[in-house]
Amino acid sequence: MSIEGEGDSATAKEIADHPFGNPTFTGRSWPLADVRLLAPILATKVIAVGRNYAAHAAESGNEVPEEPMIFLKPNTSIVGPGAPIVIPPSTSLVHHEAELAVVIGRPCKDVPASKALDMVLGYTVANDVSARDHQRKDGQWGRAKGFDTFCPLGPWIETALDASDLEISAEVDGELRQRSRTSKMVHDVPKLIEWISGVMTLLPGDVILTGTPEGVGPIQPGNTVSVTIEKIGTLTNPVVAKGS
């Protein structure tokens, strides 16, 4: 699906196959207000970057790493706009993390930073939901960040965008929690693609979460979390308890 226009006049146009390259359209379209948006991509893998904003590393009591610190989130953690973030009963401390997400558009390996943006399909909004108590207990992040629904993505992929200096923010029930700019990343998008593609092959549809700025905080059932990135849009998800 491709989104055209803005506001009340925006329309969703159906794509025949996939969004990579030059998509073929079926000719069918609907007013955007009449459709329910799903996650804009179901990634083969989600590669997330930790401590990529100095102020967030500081608020967590950590040093800024010299090289990108990466971890994987399962693609089963992905949900779309409006879908609930489900808090499992095993955790009592879950945080929101507003992040810029990079969607890869071409298979690539060992890409130099100077050519990295040629590999990008576009950008979307992410919330790297994290169970802090599990993170501290386990000493690694697979369980803490891997629960189903712990990777909201959306509302769409913006394909024509310079993402080097965009405002990024998060609100919980209308209260501003996070606000920063992507220009404050320790390692920018080209550097991240260079470094990650030196480790693993990136495939079309893979998603890179680029780290979160300061201001992360708790969410609990009954809250509504909204993450906004300038020139992309707002990703909003309610929070519920598992089984509710």
Image (spheres, grey):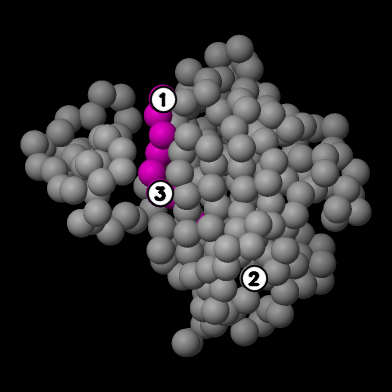
Earlier-in-chain disc, 2 versus 3: 3
Q: Is residue 190 above or below residue 18?
A: above
**Distance from the alpha carbon under mark 3 to that under mark 1:** 15 Å
Q: Which residue is mark 3?
A: 155
Query: Horizontal placement of 26 versus 158: left or right?
Result: left
The residue indicated by pointer 2 is 219
- The disc label shown at residue 160, or none: 1
- Helix, strand or loop for disc 2: strand
- Does 194 appear in magenta? no
Identity of the residue drawn at 61% across and 12% down: 114
Q: Residues within 10 Å of mark 3 (few under 14, many from 20)?
A: many
Q: Which residues are magenta?
A: 152-160
Question: Please, what is the three-letter code of the amino acid marked with disc 3?
Answer: Pro
118 or 166, nearer to the observer: 166
With respect to residue 54, does 183 lie above or below? above
Observer-nearest of 180 and 110: 180
Q: Is residue 85 visible?
A: no
Q: CA distance from mark 1 to mark 2?
A: 32 Å
Number of marks in the image? 3
Viewer-proximal residue among 136 and 198: 136
Instruction: Give the residue type that dot 1 points to.
Output: Ala
Neighbourhood count class around disc 1 (C-alpha, 10 Å): few under 14, some 14–19, many 20 upward: few
- N-terminal of the pair, mark 1 or mark 2, is 1
Q: Could you tell me if the residues under marks 3 and 1 are in contact, i.e. CB atoms within 8 Å?
A: no
Q: Splitting the image into 4 quarters, where does residue 233 fall?
A: top left
In the rendered structure, are the residues bearing label 1 and label 2 in contact, judged by CB atoms less than 8 Å apart? no
Q: Nearer the viewer, residue 55 or 197?
A: 55
